[in-house]
Image (tube, rainbow, N blue to C red):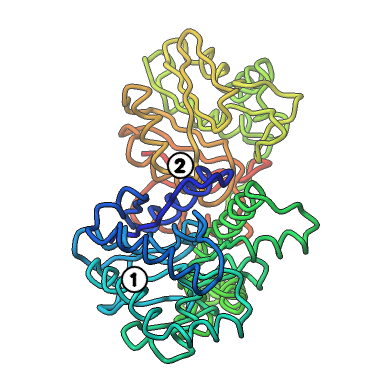
Amino acid sequence: MKVYTYYQDINFKSQDQLLELWKKSWEKRGYEAIVLNRKDAEKSVFYEEFVRKLKSLHEEIANKPLSDYGLSCWIRWLAYSTQPEEKFYVCDYDVINHHFNVTEPDNSLYLLDGDCPCIASGKPSQFYELCLKFIKTTNEYKQQFLKTYQEFNFIQYHDQEFFRISEKIKQMDYIKFSRDRENFLGIPGEGDFWKKKTVHYSHFSCRRFCETKGITHNEEARCDIIKDSLIMNQKDSFLSDCIQNFSPVCGNNIRNADNSLNELGKKLTLIGIKQLTPSIHNFLELIDLKLPKIEKYTEDNGNETSEKIKELFNKHGSDKSTAHDYHLVYSEVFEKLNKTDPINILEIGIGSQNPSIPSRMCKLFKVGGSHKAYKEYFPNAQVFGADIDKDTLFSEDRIKTSYVDQLDPVTFEEMHKNFNSPAYDLIVEDGLHSFVASLNTLNFALKYIKKGGVIVLEDLNNEGKFWNMIHYLLVANNYNSRLINSNGLMLVICL
């Protein structure tokens, strides 16, 4: 579906930026956004006559010459009339698309914001007929136009004044009108305007908006208002998209015009999410499902191997044997692997110390500490590491690292390719420590772990007992899975 706008360089500032914002907003919603100019209008055989008659009529109605801006308001319709014969939308380039997905236009010539011509739809033949009407109707009803023009105290005679006067004198039966300010077209400063399908960032509305904010109004400020509104729109859309699958199916009263959740919809959905885990546990109890218990490891589980592993973790600055007692579990894990074989070990999480990274490591510990401990314990192992913080990435003999975002499964595959797609003997997750991040890692690990290999997920948050359920599903499907608390919860799966 095409959408056209018209631009004529008449010394307005920052128009390139505004045009780019317009184009991107419509393309994001699936439209082919096209900018026309005066040369497109000049393709019409009616152009010279049209311009001459418009200038004459403007002198008679407004009692002053037609400005370049005023002329551009008229001839844009002639530019639309020279395009291929099909239905399409036309709008000012300050009408930004927030949520208006591709929609088939009406068969009629349609003004979509009442007598304001900021957005419309139609076909080239209809726009050409409209240009003829501009001249014919003004001439036929000139006295009524003059009288109404003076009554409204207009300061110019442009296309918008034509539509307003024509509607008042009942000469608009060839055009359909609609105006939906509740859902379709928003105005800056009026409520949550960015939630509307489209928003008209006109000079007038943006000037008024700037005054309420104590901001100097200019074209740059108008572009800033648009950019800020698009960011607000993205935030609302992101939250709505995240919780959409948990939302009630109960009609339009919980949704905005773009089908995103309104405040009532978000409230009901978040209440449902909060109650999800307790409801699942009530269900499991009612069907008498017994979730496997968590094993508890203490120093009584220690041995010579665990002490050696603890020594290596501490030597290289890992927190696995200080903040936790994971060496007690790794002694059993390492004994399942042949120490001298050329095995492949992957650990997600290298140990960022960047304060802006959500799951960072205390500065008492060192970046890549666990990886270096694996390298020393297994003399022929190739060790791989991955992290979302690119500043942690490093390489040295038998250690390679790559970027990964645990909340984006695609990056796991990209990481795997960067490592030349090996099969792994041991995969350890010590990264973001959110349920989904760890589950994404487990999904990846189950695809690429070797037969006889081991998967370890560390520092699991089990408040909702989600990991009890994952553990149960694994055991029910004949996986050798264990949940172990060793001063920190771990899921260990031996293949």
Q: Nearer the viewer, residue 50 or 40?
A: 50
In this view, the mark in front (2 or 1) = 1
Give amino acid for label 1: Ser
Note whether residue 468 is visible: no
Q: Mark 2 packing: few (<14 Cα in 10 Å), some, or many (20+)?
A: many
**Quadrant hosting residue 325:** top right
* Circle nearer the N terminus (2, 1): 1
Q: Please tell me which residue is depicted at 44% across the width and 70% down the height of the picture.
A: 57
Q: How many marks?
A: 2
* Numbered label attached to residue 441: 2
Q: Nearer the viewer, residue 147 or 466?
A: 147
Q: Looking at the rendering, in which quadrant would you find the C terminus? A: top left
Q: Please tell me which residue is depicted at 58% across the width and 62% down the height of the picture.
A: 202
Q: CA distance from mark 2 to mark 1?
A: 49 Å
Q: Please tell me which residue is depicted at 54% across the width and 56% down the height of the picture.
A: 234
Q: Nearer the viewer, residue 355 or 145?
A: 145
Q: Secondary structure at mark 1?
A: strand
Q: Secondary structure at mark 2?
A: helix
Give amino acid for label 2: Thr
The percent position of residue 460, horizontal first and vertical second, equals 59, 47
Tags 2 and 1 in contact by the CB under 8 Å rule? no
The percent position of residue 406, horizontal first and vertical second, equals 49, 41
Query: Which residue position is annotated with label 1?
Result: 121
Q: In this view, which residue lies farthest toward the right?
A: 214
